[in-house]
Amino acid sequence: MSNPDSIKVAAFYQFAALPDYRELREPLRAFCAGLKLKGSVLLAHEGINGTLAGAPEAIDVLAHELAHGDMFGGRLNNLELKFSAAEAMPFGRLKVRLKKEIVTLGDEAADPTRQVGTYVDASEWNALISAPDMLLLDTRNAFEVAMGTFEGAVDPGIRSFGQFKDFAAVELDPAKHRRIAMFCTGGIRCEKASAHLLARGFAEVYHLKGGILKYLEEVPEAQSRWRGECFVFDERVALGHGLQESGLQESGLQESGLQESGLRERNKDATRDE
């Protein structure tokens, strides 16, 4: 598939109670295989997280089934869903995996279905992070931050999202950091990170709804406070404003010192931390 109009990519997630997630694996895998989709989906008791690519009409059928079909019975009625295009198929095969968490933090108190930070739309993000008392925090891994981030954002210097709680325990103080704005690639890490901070007593926690990808899709480049590229966990490597492929090649990443960490993490699981 080489025609950019022939490949549509859907990135999606939702925290929702799925006690039957083990039983959902094979029906979902068969449904996606029937549509000739490729990519990765994670299923856990707490919800779903995935990125799949295929023909536009097939992706549209998938999106409708997830949100409105019988398979999930209406439990994914608040699905965070973003579409983009690819010049070539960005995945080699289809994987549907069972996990303890759809994004790994390792804190049972962090439950976005019980409490979560305040969502901020992309159109309102610039104004929010301009506030002088706001701590702007990038919750992504260090190799992702190295490729691009928002002006003035704090890099926690973590190798995986599971280390975020250790960073927060040492570097963040509820008495000092009273207003925190967080962002990540698609929004999922921020939902869990915000639940973690609220459980620890932080007063005001905000996060970018739809993540960096939604911001790059909706905010004109001339008004953007984003600098660099946004790493994505598939063969496109990175996206820029308008969700256009950046043209970065793996050889370029190797020269910049990012290939060893970034691409190894990507190859472990395409949707592990998105």
Image: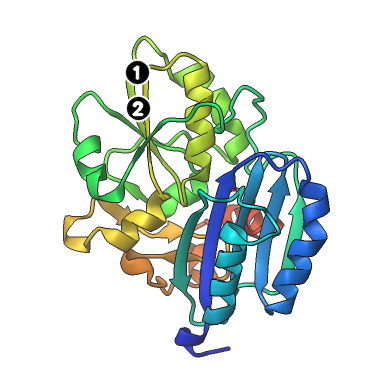
- Dividing the picture into quadrants, the one containing residue 207 is top left
The residue at the point 41 percent across, 65 percent down is 239
Residue 254 appearing in the image:
no
* Picture layout, residue 109 above or below residue 51: above
Where residue 226 appears, x then y in whole percent?
Answer: 29, 52
Q: Which residue is mark 2?
A: 180
Residue 250 appearing in the image:
yes
Q: Amino acid at mark 2?
A: Ile
Where residue 26 appears, x then y in whole percent?
Answer: 82, 61
Q: Nearer the viewer, residue 54 or 212?
A: 54
Q: Residues within 10 Å of mark 2 (few under 14, many from 20)?
A: many
Q: Which residue is mark 1?
A: 177
Position of residue 27 in the picture relative to residue 177 (left or right):
right
Measure how far apart labels 2 and 1 are at the Cα level. 7 Å
Q: Amino acid at mark 1?
A: His
Position of residue 209 in the picture relative to residue 109 (left or right):
left
Where residue 119 appears, x then y in whole percent?
Answer: 37, 38
